[in-house]
Amino acid sequence: MAPNVSAKSNRALATAPSETSTEALLKLAAFQAELLRRSRWVGSDFATEARAMHEGERPEGPIHGQASAAEVSELVEEGVPIAPLLFPVAPPDQIN
């Protein structure tokens, strides 16, 4: 059992959780933006392209695009290495 010792009243308060969360989200968003910059947009052909790379029909490389829940399930069942993006991404032709 740990002793019940209160913190010193003159101790500085830690950073507020919302500030820490905001900083973490900004770092994640910057990381995702860098990954997207280095990858190729394949749009709704994502499942087809990912599967083709996995099966050796196309050269491997980073891609991003859109896939339905059913397509994602099939890719996972087939062992195709995929990961969801943490933040939504607009298709390149829809960006201002």
Image (cartoon, rainbow, N blue to C red):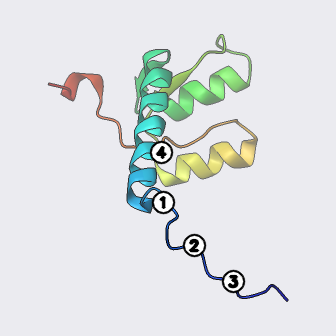
The local crowd at label 2, few if under 14, some if 14 to 19, many if 20 or more residues have their Cα within 10 Å, is few
Residue under label 3, please give it: 5
Q: Nearer the viewer, mark 4 or mark 3?
A: 3
Q: Determine the image quadrant of residue 89.
A: top left
User: What residue is drawn where x is 22% and y is 22%?
Assistant: 93
Q: Which label's residue is closer to the chain start, 2 or 4?
A: 2
SS type, badge 1? loop
Q: Which label's residue is closer to the chain start, 3 or 1?
A: 3
Q: In the visual, does 24 lie left or right of 54?
A: left
SS type, badge 3? loop
- Look at label 2 and name its amino acid: Lys
| CA gap, disc 4 and disc 3 | 31 Å
Q: Which mark is residue 8?
A: 2
The local crowd at label 1, few if under 14, some if 14 to 19, many if 20 or more residues have their Cα within 10 Å, is few
Q: Nearer the viewer, mark 2 or mark 4?
A: 2
Picture quarter with the C terminus: top left
Which residue sits furthest top? 59
- Look at label 3 and name its amino acid: Val
Residue under label 1, please give it: 12
SS type, badge 4? helix
Q: Which mark is residue 24?
A: 4
